[in-house]
Image (spheres, rainbow, N blue to C red):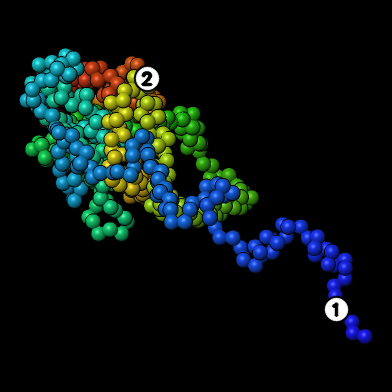
Amino acid sequence: MLLSHRPPPAAAHLRAAAPSWTQPLQARRLAGPPQASASAEFPGSVPDGVQMPPRRRRRRSVAGIDQDELLDPEALADPDSSFYEINGVRLHHKVCSHEDEDSSSDRSSDATVSAAARSRVGLPVLLLHGFGASVFSWSRVMRPLARIVGAKVLAFDRPAFGLTSRPSWSGDDSKPLNPYSMAFSVMATLAFIDYLSAEKAVLVGHSAGCLVAVDAYFEAPERVAVLVLVAPAIFAPRKEVKDSTTGEQEGQKQNVPNDESSPPNLFARIWGGFLELCKHIAGLVSKMMMAIRDIFLSLYVKALVAFLRSSFGAMLVRWVMDKFGILGVRNAWYDPGKVTDHVIQGYTKPLKSRGWETALLEHTISMIIDSQSATRVPVSKRLSEISCPVLVVTGDTDRIVPAWNAERVAHAIPGARFEVIKGCGHLPQEERPEEFLSVVERFLRTVFGSPNEQAFQAAV
């Protein structure tokens, strides 16, 4: 008997009773995965063939200045700007002459100018700005100063600041002189005296610019008639006070007679020899420690310079200027509320110049290297060598260079005159121009006027 193969009734019943949704599921399994398409199931998806608009790049800004559209320094020059090239560096400067027509904005400041001072000085004035500043820092006093001295007044932007060009530089360059070094600023200062066709000039430095003025004096004292140091960023050492009691004790020890007839003390001789040996060993150890310290210090300086010249260094200086640049300007004034938008724009304008952060880093590196130079004697240790007339001016509420430090600088220079302007911060020439001009005029009248002909002859 032939048996036919039939599915069991139960299986047939199950197949017949299968729900309708299994058939589409089987069809989808045979057809494969679904094609990507834009639907409401995937929010934000883009249909095929449709291109996304380009993503807008975030614009960089430092102290409110757009860093994506930087210009060459000369493109930012003012109508009265000039450029003078020294060793391939185009130095931005401005010149005011006593022969220029008076402007109504200067007449109030010019009230302090006396005919005696105007007719006696006859020497040009060079203005040297501080760290982070520029020619703009002297804009309120240049023309009145020209009428005070009866000669030209020149202010220039040191490399890394203002609108002076920012040449590339590295330690192995074949250029004759690092443009961001103190030596270059001194050379430029003396070159501008020649530029004005003068044998000597009055140097007025502000803050770090005082270092340039004093270094220029030591480089060529015959070219500097007078120094005016405004809020000098020079650390003046304290005067050493000799201990009179120690001197008396040493004298008493020297007056003690040596009793050669006393019997020799063997223990004292051994103990004395042991102490001398210990001193000798301590001296050798001290020299070894100093050598090790110098090695570590040299390695530290090299590592620091490498970091500053890296991309991280540029990022750091941009961040610092963005966070603290404008704050530093306001903090330099006695009353920060009086810092106008015009002042802020004057200080932030150089941030529009291409390469400003690299130049500022190179200037910082140059200061670090100069401070580690074993052959360079600090200016603070040579202040007593200055013999020309010197005026030191400071604000009574200077938060950057305290007035007490400026007073120490004045005391360290023989015959220096010290003046304090009340209700003034770190920038007397900007915050209190009338008082500043009055102080400078009185000092120049003392130096060059008839009451002190000997000082006049010595300066000229």
Residue at the (9%, 16%) spot, across then down:
115
Give whichever of 231, 373 is nearer the camera: 231
Q: Position of residue 323 (x, y in %)?
A: 42, 35
- Residue at 23%, 56% in the rendered image: 175
User: Marks 2/1: CA distance?
Assistant: 104 Å
- Tell me the mark number nearer the camera, choosing from 2 and 1: 1
Q: Residues within 10 Å of mark 1 (few under 14, many from 20)?
A: few
Report helix, strand or loop for mark 1: loop
> Which residue has dot 1 on it?
5
Left or right: 351 in relation to 84: right
Residue at the far right: name it. 1
Image location of residue 343, percent across then percent down: 29, 26
> Residue at image x 18%, y 26%?
142
Point out the tag, 2 or 1, that comes first from the N-terminus.
Answer: 1
Residue 207's place in the image compared with 297, above or below, is above
The C terminus lies in quadrant: top left
Which quadrant would residue 151 be assigned to in this image? top left
Q: Is residue 219 left or right of residue 329?
A: left
The amino acid pointed to by label 1 is: His
Q: Quadrant of the N terminus?
A: bottom right
Disc 2 marks a residue whose amino acid type is Gly
As drawn, the residue found furthest toward the front would be: 1
Residue beneath label 2, please? 337
- Give coordinates of residue 287: x percent, y percent: 48, 54
Residue at point 25%, 59% (across, down): 174
Residue 357 drawn above or below residue 460: below
